[in-house]
Image (tube, grey):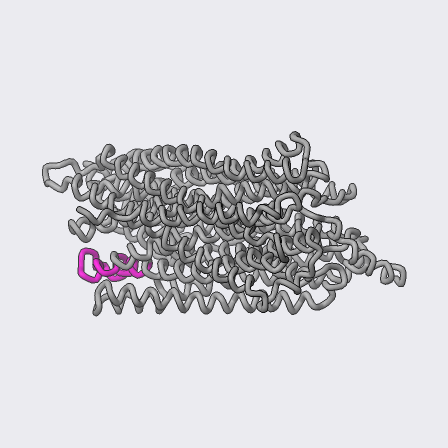
Amino acid sequence: MLGSLFSLPVLLLTPALAVASEANLVIPNLNQHQNNLLLIGIVVCILGMLFGLYQFNKVKKLEAHPAMLDVANTIYETCKTYLIQQGKFLAILFAFIGLCIAFYFGFLQQMPIGSVLFILMWTIIGILGSYSVAWYGIRMNTLANSRTAFAGLTRKPLKVLNIALDAGMSIGLLLVCVELIMMLIILLFVPRELAGASFIGFAIGESLGASALRIAGGIFTKIADIGSDLMKIVFGIKEDDPRNPGVIADCTGDNAGDSVGPTADGFETYGVTGVALVTFIVLAVAPALQTALLTWIFVMRVLMVITSVAAFYINRSMSQAKYANVEDLDFEQPLTSLVWITSILSIIVTFVVSYMLLGPSSGVPAELSALWFVLAIIISFGTLGAAIIPEFTKIFTSPKSSHVAEVVKASREGGPSLNILSGLVAGNFSAFWIGMVFLALMFGAYYASGFGLADIMIYPSIFAFGLVAFGMLGMGPVTIAVDSYGPVTDNAQSIYELSLIEEIPDIAKQIEKDFGFKPDFDKAKYYLEANDGAGNTFKATAKPVLIGTAVVGATTMIFSLILVIQSVLGVEPEAILNLLNPYTILGFICGGAVIYWFTGASTQAVTTGAYRAVQYIKDNINLDESASQKANIENSKEVVKICTQYAQAGMFNIFIAIFSFALAFAFLAAPSGSQAPVSLFVSYLISIAVFGLFQAVFMANAGGCWDNAKKVVEVDLQEKGTPLHDASVVGDTVGDPFKDTSSVALNPIIKFTTLFGLLAMEIAISESFRHIAPTVGIVFLAIALFFVWRSFYGMRIPTDK
């Protein structure tokens, strides 16, 4: 015991002091027992993927009327066209990132060409991971949407719910398992001298893919949504009227924005948070303890696959017992219980397995085994937060919430003006309260970290913050499942209308003969609209969780950057990273400015694109009584083309600016004359995270409030086509880019900036580059400002006509 106490100071002095960069971020070798545990983890992930594919086939085998299947297939075909275009764009964007990676590792670090290509390979795998799971999500959702729509006719609301939830769990399980297998392969099989750089390259690739797909998808979906919705006011037509060319584009956008974006985003979130913790452990923890902590971290990630599947079946059994024979169902209740069952089960398993892996009888060093309870508590703060945050979000976004009721009431008296003001109030209040929740979670983790973590690592509070983000992801498949539930329910309602099923001659008799039940069309429309409201709510609840993990996890990655700066420049962080250094304040201002520019630029792309879409739809919509009631596919394709054009133009402007800002501020922070400027980039990253958190939560929940206020008017009050409905539609069109464009894209933007910023700063402070870095930084700042200019003046609505 005394020997271990005397050796501990030596251990604590050695971590990371020789580490100058991720180029020599060496992942330690695991022992045979640890290897075997993680190999079992790979097997569990393969089984999780098989479960996801089982759910896929289960949904695919369900029956639906051919009229609905045809519409769903049309939506999928337009989604395929969109994704192929996005794939080409990702290849272009990779060229920018690939050049930076090759320059750093190949030129500045003098790595062999084979090693550089190996790291680039993992970057490409990260991009393909985000892209492929996004494609899988679209295919799953476009199978489930028609089946959900058809199930509405059966007068079995639980069946309507289960189909969408089966699809969501399929996506959530497959997504997490694919990402985890990739990271386990790096940890177990990649040579130690390349594993650290491969982790970073993989995470940058994931983040690039997610950022591009989130930004473009968010712009696309809201151009189509606004163009479609405004026709209800202009022409007084019904929801999802097939004659409206914007409706097919809107359905495509539901998948591009609410499926492609979140799926790629979720894939990236789990990878980036894991990489942040791996980096921290290697940089900040005593070497003798690193392998035990790394094994523990990855076993915890594998367990979330098991607990999510177990919770899914427990919740399914409870729902079946409670709701199997009811004809009216609050669709939010089974989803809420699934989240809480998963959270509670995950917390229990966390304590049990942490004791087995790190407890007194586990065989790990005594200084670590004494902390198993503390580590389990800290992770559990995050797991509990992943259930509490949705509850706070529902206060502001659920159709049953008082804030949504206030928006409806204000709209009745004050029209669109008071509708918008009430929604802004809800968004602001939500940002405050969810900010308080994050404060409580992080303070709890910080307080717990004081019970011994400082004995085994430096900066234990930062590790605790990373574990909170990690714990939020402990129920990852379920978080993604309830998020993916939304695009299925949204599409299902649209497919019902677009199929014109009620107008098919003798349709009731046909369905009874072919499918064995008597359809109820009125109930079907009610179920699908009410279920869409639940989908809106749970799309809203997932956003703060993913945004929160980005911010909390970013603190851990920023810490890694600080250690790199300390190692390379030989400075004490507290000597320059403080408020007395003017560069710190300047960095905070830069970060805030970029967040507000990004918000405006992404909304500008939506505004201009929607202007063009509305213009086209007005000119081409045919409402003559003698005209076909079916959707005009050619006109619909033209609207999709407009959406794609502005989504890609907006994404390209935004991404190149974000990329250039990261390089510019990193290079301008290079210590060419003094070390004080180094603080500029660190505070820039912190500012991006903090400003981004509150801006994203405010916008997401304001948008969710407006969206469900419209749903209340349509479903509960049955006042479609009234001035109240018009006011709620206007509010919803304001909320569209709030909740589904700007806010959600801030999540991958925060993570990409932090991850790529780590690489950018390492380039900047490299001894052979730092003397010219500020000059190059000015060039990149000029490029960034040019694309900022393009993002508005190159995208603006023409005013000369």
Q: How many marks?
A: 0
The residue most toward the right is: 3
If the image is split into quadrants, where does the N terminus sit? bottom right
Which residue is nearer to you in this view: 551 or 116?
116
Q: Is residue 260 magenta?
A: no
Q: Measured from the top left, where is residue 34 in percent x and y? A: 75, 45
The residue positioned 66% from the left and 64% from the top of the image is 575
Q: Is residue 689 above or below residue 132?
A: below
The residue positioned 27% from the left and 57% from the top of the image is 715
Which of the 4 image quarters holds residue 356?
bottom right
The residue positioned 56% from the left and 36% from the top of the image is 125
Please indicate whether residue 94 sits to the left or right of residue 180 in the image: left
Which residue is nearer to you in this view: 101 or 469?
101
Q: Is residue 191 above or below residue 278?
A: above
Q: Measured from the top left, where is residue 642 in percent x and y? A: 29, 39
Q: Is residue 712 magenta?
A: yes
Q: Is residue 350 visible?
A: yes
Please indicate whether residue 741 sits to the left or right of residue 467 in the image: left
Q: Is residue 627 above or below residue 168?
A: above
Majority SS type along the magenta span: helix
The residue positioned 55% from the left and 50% from the top of the image is 774
The residue most toward the front is: 673
Which of the 4 image quarters holds residue 513?
top left
Q: Is residue 143 above or below residue 302?
A: above
Q: Is residue 338 visible?
A: no
Which segment is the magenta one? 708-728
